[in-house]
Image (spheres, helix red, strand yellow):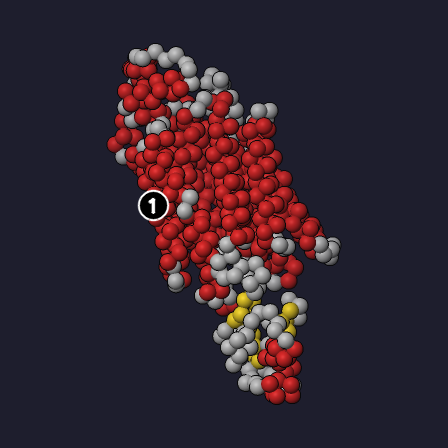
Amino acid sequence: MGAQDFRCAVPSFPNDTFSIQNEAHARLINATIPFDKEKDSISQCLQYKVSLDNSTAQSTNVTKAETQSCSRWVYSSDVFSSSFISELNLVCDREMYISHANMMSMAGLMLGSLICGAFSDQFGRKKAFLFFYWFHMIVAFGTILATSVPAFLISRLLVAGTGMAFYMSIYVLITEMVAPQKRVLAGTCANLGWVLGMLLLLLLAYFFRYWKTLQLALSIPLLIIAITYFWLIPESPRWLLSKGRYSEAQTILTEMARVNKKDFPQKLLLRETHEETSNDEKKIPEVTQVSESRLKSLMLLFKSPILCVRLGILGFSWAVNSMVYYGVTLNMGSIIPGDIYINFLIMSLLELVSHLMVPLSLRWVGRRLFYCVLVFIGGGACLATILPIVLNYESEWVMISLSNLGKFCITAAFNVMWLYTSELLPTPARQSGIGFCSFVGRVGGVISPYIVSLQTVLGGRVGEAAPLLVFGATAVAAGVLCLLLPETTRRKLPETVVEAENLKRSKENAV
């Protein structure tokens, strides 16, 4: 959705270009298109209501002419040779379609979060990952064929939805496959893949300036992973145990022990699992109920007042993180001034640093404290963008620095929230719980494009800062609410609802 600079095309001049061709061309532009004093440039959406030839253009008093909306535009090719926006003229009265397109991406993330949780808890993490990944790849190639707004909106919905679904599946799989002391590192490695994708996007976007060529270049690498990952990743042993499939879990754990050169007693798993479930009758119906229905795994959380309140706090925090993160990322060219490639590079490098900072910091501070500090700083940085306006101090770098600081902290907070949520929820409902939080969180992503459009509605310098002010205020509110959640540092993952409820009251499960 690369935005290009544009203006109204000169009427009755089929060879018009955004760049000025010669002096006569400049006179035609001045004679047919009014000057927008508010933007200090020629109008992008209005033209004079006159019909001119060269002689008329030199003699008409254009300051008194009536104006009308443009029906044709020309676009700058300095950044992009062509984009979907320029191909379908999604500007001026049709500019809201850009917000609709970003909204469809967020709605796709919401839909993917909802479907993936139930699908993964019912059929397994590996099957969910492979199914949604292949679906994502097919839709990614199909996006190139979109030639209308409805087709493009649908493709945005499906690409985002399937992408979120397979990402959630692999993230939970990674979390459940490693020891508690390695969870932070494993989660961070998973998130680094997102940053590498951003850097790859930046590199390809620099060389491929036509949107269809760029989309094709980004889709081709998906084929390699689609073929190889079928054999490379196993199913989650924790999920197999929650389903009562003990022999399959033992086979995977035995292979893991062999690869890591560790000894693993062949019948230990089956014996200990049988003894544990026999001695605790409360655990048997819980696992059985999860097997009966995909929805019952999530109902385990709603039936517990303690976990229900926590789920509400987590959902709000996800909504804020999603709103700020995607609001700044997807609309970077609108709310952050400067060169889009340089800004995106800075943003990507800061995101890389934030992901690397998280595991190092979490070794010394708890999940809850670290998350709250991050959203307080990030929210404060976004709120501080009002200062240049109040002080009437014009500086692009002040806005760039504050907005990137906010984005940096929210990215790190998002990283912590994925891990923190998975550690607060019990195994039988972990994937469904994360899916629910992600689903609720995408509400923030859905409304983020419209919050960004406040700058157009309000106008002026206040309008420029309005989106970041909203982002900052909600981030601070999320930090306050998360102070009510328990700490999970150095504790084993809760296997049952009872263990999850006792996280705050007991430290017996500390590791």
Residue 409: % across, % down = 59, 39
Q: Quadrant of residue 364?
A: top right
Q: How many marks?
A: 1
Amino acid under label 1?
Answer: Phe
Q: Quadrant of residue 55?
A: bottom right
Tell me which residue sits at (53%, 70%) in the image.
74
Residue 201: % across, % down = 51, 47
Q: Nearer the viewer, residue 135 or 466?
A: 135
Q: Nearer the viewer, residue 298 or 262?
A: 262
Residue farthest toward the left in the current orientation of the protein? 292
Tell me which residue sits at (35%, 20%) in the image.
255
Would you place residue 41 above or below residue 467 in this image? below
Q: Is residue 223 visible?
A: yes
Tell me which residue sits at (57%, 33%) in the image.
356
Residue 155: % across, % down = 38, 54
Residue 504: % across, % down = 49, 24
Residue 463 falls left or right of residue 134:
right
Residue 80 falls left or right of residue 233:
right
Classed neighbour count for the residue bearing mark 1: other residues with Cα under 10 Å, few (<14), some (14–19), many (≥20): some
Would you place residue 494 above or below residue 472 in this image? above
Tell me which residue sits at (64%, 66%) in the image.
39
Task: Look at the numbered disc 1 and give the secondary structure of its residue.
Answer: helix
Would you place residue 78 above or below residue 54 in this image? above
The residue under label 1 is 135
Q: Quadrant of residue 463?
A: bottom right
Q: Is residue 305 visible?
A: no
